[in-house]
Image (spheres, rainbow, N blue to C red):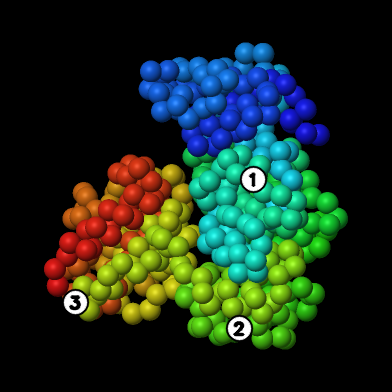
Amino acid sequence: MNWLNHDSFAVWGMGVSGIASANLLARRGKRVIASDTRSLESLTSVREALDPRIELVGGGNVVDSAQVVVASPGLPPTLEVFKGLNVPVVSEIEIAFDAAKCRFLAITGTDGKTTTTALTAHILEAAGLKTMAAGNIGTPLCEVVESFGAADVIVAEVSAFQLWSTHHFHAEASAFTNIAEDHLDYFSSFDEYVAAKRRLLSFSTDEDWAILNMGDAYIRNWGEDFAGTVATYGLKASDTENHLWFDGDLIRRNDEVLWRFEDCQLKGAHNALNMMAATHLALRTGVEMDVIAKAMATFRPLAHRVEPVKVVGDVAYLDDSKATNAHAAMAGIRSLEGDLVVIAGGVDKGLDLVPFCEVLRVRAKAVVVIGDIATRLTDGLERAGHTKVVAASTMEEAVQMAQKLAAGQGSVLLSPACSSFDMFRSYAHRGDVFQDAVRALKA
């Protein structure tokens, strides 16, 4: 099956991936009708970005005479518009896959996939391969895939939002970081979310690798019926072949020492896991272990992922705005030592807050809550027994409160455990506002 054998396509949703897929299809000579729920008058910038051969419709999503619908990842499968369609719904990443000549590596999971994707591309660049990180990490696959040849490698971060509408997309190696409760506002159930992640393995061949986190209760058994090679990693040794593990100090391949974790700029056990997943991905492409180990030492942490911002007085301020769910936030909190004040909150996605509140009770001497979830998070912290919780209405106010609560020692961490769209344009915008507020502080 190759979707590009069809002649007519409807592309729903004119975000970056919709524009990229519509343009690729137009370059291939396909008839494309692109539509968006926004009014046509508000789509001027979209019109300018689209190939002139594409028909643009505003005010709703249309099929017209299309043989295939390419759906934006922002459109959840639960939408009424998908019910009763008599044409297949496919993902932008699958259109790119069908247009590609290059090799693919893929990374998915609830947390850690962006760091793992960027780290893998960094290793491949160090090995001299033509590569880039693309997909959910920022640049749509359809925008770049045609510029990569058969020997080149695209490292693709893929999300459940993209995977639920795939039908044959697969990579020569697929890494799974973890599964945690998230996106219950998008899928009809947690099981549906997990199934979308696992779909990355559904179309694999016996030449492909499945790279599995053995510490994750959902992922660890996914290799049992996998036709290809299973590579594993975790925080414990294993007697299985092709296993990487972190002993708290050293990264090992079974009994072989690969490198000292403290020699790298990434910190925390969660990043050791990301490193091991990236190592397996690089090994699958043929990169030598000595190249991988050297590349690990030169990789710089990504923005908004426990990113050091500034030391004011004796207090270090760190930005973990990318922690958009409780599981990611807890990993960042656990990676730090000493006195800690946490700024948390944002959009309430209805997730279970009990584990997060318990971690805050143990690790944070004070918590500043913000956003839509502020009241529910405050109630959860009080039930957990946390006695020092205050609320702020702006990020600037939250930073100022956190400075007072830190009392001149330890760290202040922005660790939202929520998405950002109640107060900010994105997690990156939230992190930038936090950083600006920190830089405005006086000791």
What residue do we see at 47% from left, 18% from top?
A: 58
Asked whether, in this view, residue 181 is left or right of residue 258, the answer is: left
From mark 3 to mark 2, how far is it between C-alphas? 35 Å
- Residue 51 locus on image (x, y percent): 55, 26
The picture quadrant where one finds residue 4 is top right
Which SS class for mark 3?
loop
Kind of residue at disc 3: Gly
Comparing 42 with 109, the one in front is 42
Dot in front, 3 or 2: 2
Q: Which residue bears the numbered disc 2?
A: 259
Q: Which tag, 2 or 1, sits closer to the chain's start? A: 1
Q: For residue 354, say whether it is visible.
A: no
Asked whether, in this view, residue 72 is left or right of residue 283, the answer is: left
Quadrant that contains the C terminus:
bottom left
Q: Are marks 2 and 1 in contact (CB under 8 Å)?
A: no
The picture quadrant where one finds residue 273 is bottom right
Q: Which residue bears the numbered disc 1?
A: 147
Answer few, some or many: residues within 10 Å of disc 2's Cα (few below 14, many 20 plus, some between 14 and 19): some
Comparing 409 with 152, the one in front is 152
Asked whether, in this view, residue 283 is left or right of residue 313, the answer is: right
What residue do we see at 59% from left, 29% from top?
A: 22
Comparing 345 with 362, the one in front is 345
- Residue 189 locus on image (x, y percent): 58, 41
From mark 2 to mark 1, how far is it between C-alphas? 35 Å
Q: Which tag, 3 or 2, sits closer to the chain's start? A: 2
